[in-house]
Amino acid sequence: FNTFQCYLKDTDRKIAEHIDRADRDGFNFAAKLVRGAYMVLERARAKELKQASPIHDCIEETHACFDQAVRTILQREAVVEGRSDANLLVASHNQNSIEKAIETMSQLGLSSGESGVSFGQLLGMSDHISYTLGRGGYKAYKYVPYGPVSEVLPYLIRRAQENSDLLGGVAQQRSMLLEELRSRAAGVIWK
């Protein structure tokens, strides 16, 4: 999988180039779409080099880029389904974007479990989304960063900054987890 960071202004162009190259050269196209987490570093580097920032000017542009990239790749997936030529990992904690991806899959006739589409979230973040996807038959993955603390901690801090809008969803997630625990406990009692 190539990772495409949708906070970059040239992401649409890069995806189109990679798709064209895969088609031309006959290899499988596989993409992991993320919003991105290096905004501070990218902006600082651009400023240092006296260049325009490569980052979208606002979060709404990043959201639009992410959702458009998902649509572009899903439309390609719909054309080549059954040949396993396209693979997409929608790596997002954003419930709205995931719902849009599922809606687009449905519109294009892409099945939940048999297409080359999967979803991924960081373990411990948006678990309610991952569980719902899994129950719906979608391929859902949780990833766990590992390595030296000096590398993992900054990574996790960037994830938290990137997903600060999720902090409002913590109460919702806690409520959903309690509901799931009650449901499972009731299932054990009644068996």
Image: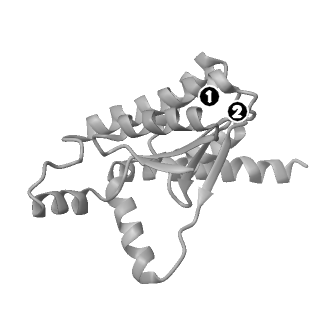
Position of residue 54 in the picture relative to residue 179 (left or right): left
Residue at 76%, 54% (x, y): give it: 185
Q: Quadrant of residue 75?
A: top right
| Residue bearing the label numbered 2 | 115
Furthest residue to the right? 191
Out of 165 and 9, give the one closest to the viewer.
9
Position of residue 137 in the picture relative to residue 3 (left or right): right
| Residue bearing the label numbered 1 | 77
Out of 14 and 123, give the one closest to the viewer.
14
Q: Position of residue 107 (x, y in %)?
A: 59, 16
Residue at 87%, 47% (x, y): give it: 190
Q: Please, what is the three-letter code of the amino acid marked with disc 2? A: Ser
Crowd class of label 2 (few under 14; some 14 to 19; many from 20; radius 10 Å): many
Residue 96 visible from this viewpoint: no
Element type at marker 1? helix
Residue 183 visible from this viewpoint: yes
Relative vertical location of residue 122 with respect to residue 65 in this rendering, above or below = below
Q: Nearer the viewer, mark 1 or mark 2?
A: 1
Furthest residue to the front? 25
Element type at marker 2? loop
Residue at 50%, 32% (x, y): give it: 20
Q: Position of residue 48 (x, y in %)?
A: 11, 64
Q: Position of residue 163 (x, y in %)?
A: 37, 52
Residue 63 numbered mark, or none: none
Crowd class of label 1 (few under 14; some 14 to 19; many from 20; radius 10 Å): many
Mark 1 and mark 2: span between their CA atoms? 8 Å
Labels 1 and 2: the sequence-earlier one? 1
Q: Please, what is the three-letter code of the amino acid marked with disc 1? A: Glu
Q: Are marks 1 and 2 in contact (CB under 8 Å)?
A: yes
